[in-house]
């Protein structure tokens, strides 16, 4: 490990020297020119920008589409809906829409457009089972041009939170629908957001231009280009050369450049590094439902937990920019501060658990149980520098306790498919994040498109599902707290979600760029608030 970091630092030093020779004639690097344009590096193409499906880049979709309401540190605030009323029984939501708003193609945003979009999402409900609101909506109704009514089958406390998400309950011009639907594709990407998608060359770049007719005023940054680049030195050099001037953690937590490179940039006068408060928990998901895998064994999952040195990961791999995580959710997440017992880094405890569970071995050999070897596959995002490094560290450590991990790097869509089909032993993932937790991640425990396979093999799986269903509909706050305590205790004790670090959203930007703030989500940035001084 030490040799690896020495090589990285040497490379960064040489790159910094080269960068010092690339000053423009006026003494400024390209990165510090206030030209009202941003070019950001992204490790993947924006893909299909249909906001009612999931292949697209969430940072890109967040610029183009908007929701009825917005999640803020102060709670739910108006966005395309100026206000709303909730019936006494908690099942009917009446939204009073902002008037004078138009889609990018000039079509009016009104109650009929809201109904068409939400109906289109609901017509493809099987794709959205991870978001429980999709199972609660029973009726949509246009009351008048600017008033829309949504009826639920029962009270659902996260309804407004889920309506505020980047997708799927956001709004596309009905003219872009195909045969009145969006589930089989769309003909355009016209939202109501502060930016319009104007050009896209697959796997190369996408261009977004300011929406001059934006209801909240045209943004100061008039053009944003998302440029697809490999992670690591390529992106670092692109920053130094001025080919890109903005980098941020993408929607999978993938780091385009590592923490050491960020620090090197921050030491110059040309760039600033801005970090949000902790937003998520990065973790390894263990497939308890895969009966022929050692991951099905609780003792194996607990042993892996004890065999991970989170302090070293946070300090060495993330240079102290992330913090060790002892539980699935950090204590600042609603309902999560319940005093769960941490599992410390303790290799002796890991070996004891394996021995007691019948996983035995001779010195230096892989453990066996009932003729089966203690061997598993660990999948990581091939685009993530940190995931690969963490995987190698964990692989080396567990080998010392008689466990063998085969490391497999794949693209994010492949890993997402494995997660939904159950075709994995272990894989890297992360919680939905501050704006969505605990309700969205917890709801995903029962979703076949998310974490159902991770939880279905535990002893209390049926009770867990029942409690998750109940916690989402109860109107009794004390009952909700009690249910969350039981739910989080169960998954903690079963060790199906093995926490690594608490992550944040990190931005590398020109020092002249002002107005860099963060939303209550790790998936998008408020570009409309940014400007050059």
Image: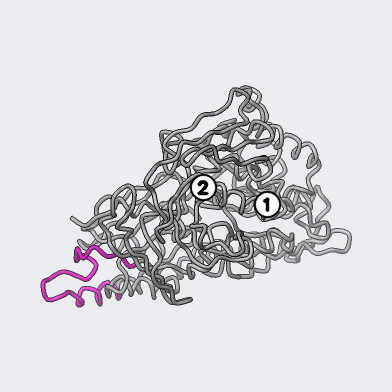
**Toward the viewer: 444 or 132?**
132
**Classed neighbour count for the residue bearing mark 1: other residues with Cα under 10 Å, few (<14), some (14–19), many (≥20):** some
Q: Mark 1 points at which residue?
A: 125
Q: Is residue 160 above or below residue 214?
A: above
| Along the viewing direction, whichever of 132 and 478 lies nearer the viewer | 132
Q: Is mark 1 on a helix, strand or loop?
A: helix
Describe the colour scheme in one phrase: one colour
Q: Which residue lies furthest to the right in this view?
A: 370
Q: In this view, does 492 lie to the left or right of 503?
A: right
* Magenta highlight on residue 521: no
Place of residue 357 in the rendered image (x, y in percent of width and height, measured from the top left): 81, 49
State which region is magenta. 14-39
Which quarter of the rendering shows the C terminus? Answer: bottom left
Secondary element at image label 2 = loop
Q: Where is residue 120 in the image (x, y as percent from the top left)?
A: 61, 54
The disc at residue 165 is: 2
């Amino acid at each position: 490990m030490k040799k690896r970091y020495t090589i990285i630092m040497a490379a960064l030093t040489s790159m910094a020297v080269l960068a010092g020779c690339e000053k423009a004639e006026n003494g400024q690097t390209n990165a510090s020119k206030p030209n009202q344009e941003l070019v950001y590096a992204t490790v993947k193409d924006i893909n299909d920008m249909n906001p009612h499906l999931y292949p697209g880049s969430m940072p890109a979709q967040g610029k183009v589409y908007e929701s009825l309401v917005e999640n803020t540190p102060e709670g739910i605030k108006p966005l395309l809906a100026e206000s709303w009323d909730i019936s006494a029984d908690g099942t009917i939501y009446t939204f009073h829409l902002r008037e004078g708003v138009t889609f990018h193609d000039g079509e009016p945003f009104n109650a009929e457009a809201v109904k068409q979009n939400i109906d289109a999402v609901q017509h493809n409900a099987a794709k959205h089972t991870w978001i429980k609101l999709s199972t609660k909506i029973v009726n949509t109704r246009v009351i008048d041009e600017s008033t829309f009514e949504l009826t639920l089958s029962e009270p659902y406390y996260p309804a407004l939170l889920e309506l505020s998400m980047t997708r799927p309950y956001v709004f596309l011009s009905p003219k872009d629908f195909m045969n009145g639907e969006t589930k089989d594709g769309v003909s355009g990407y016209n939202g109501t957001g502060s930016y319009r998608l104007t050009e896209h060359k697959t796997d190369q770049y996408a261009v977004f231009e300011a929406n001059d007719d934006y209801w909240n005023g045209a943004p100061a940054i008039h053009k944003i280009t998302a440029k697809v680049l490999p992670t690591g030195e390529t992106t670092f050099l692109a920053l130094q050369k001025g080919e890109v001037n903005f980098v941020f953690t993408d929607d999978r937590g993938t780091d385009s450049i590592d923490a050491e490179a960020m620090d090197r940039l921050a030491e110059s006068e040309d760039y600033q590094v801005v970090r949000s408060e902790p937003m998520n928990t990065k973790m390894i998901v263990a497939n308890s439902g895969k009966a022929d895998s050692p991951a099905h064994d609780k003792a194996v999952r607990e042993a892996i937990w004890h065999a991970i040195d989170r302090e070293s990961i946070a300090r060495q791999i993330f240079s102290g920019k992330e913090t060790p995580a002892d539980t699935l959710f950090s204590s600042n997440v609603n309902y999560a501060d319940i005093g769960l017992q941490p599992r410390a880094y303790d290799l002796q405890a890991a070996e004891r658990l394996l021995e007691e569970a019948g996983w035995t071995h001779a010195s230096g050999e892989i453990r066996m149980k009932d003729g089966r070897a203690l061997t598993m596959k660990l999948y990581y995002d091939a685009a993530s520098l940190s995931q690969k490094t963490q995987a190698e560290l964990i692989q080396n450590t567990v080998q010392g306790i008689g466990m063998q991990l085969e490391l497999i790097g794949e693209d994010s869509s492949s890993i997402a498919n494995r997660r939904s089909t159950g075709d994995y032993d272990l894989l890297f993932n992360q919680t939905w994040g501050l704006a969505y937790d605990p309700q969205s991640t917890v709801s995903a425990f029962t979703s076949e498109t998310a974490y159902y396979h991770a939880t279905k093999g535990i002893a209390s799986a049926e009770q867990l599902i029942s409690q998750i269903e109940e916690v989402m509909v109860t109107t009794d706050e004390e009952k909700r707290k009690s249910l969350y305590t039981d739910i989080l205790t169960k998954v903690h004790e079963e060790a199906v979600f093995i926490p690594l670090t608490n992550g944040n959203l990190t931005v590398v930007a020109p020092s002249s760029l002002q107005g860099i703030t963060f939303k209550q989500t790790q998936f998008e940035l408020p570009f409309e608030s940014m400007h050059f001084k």
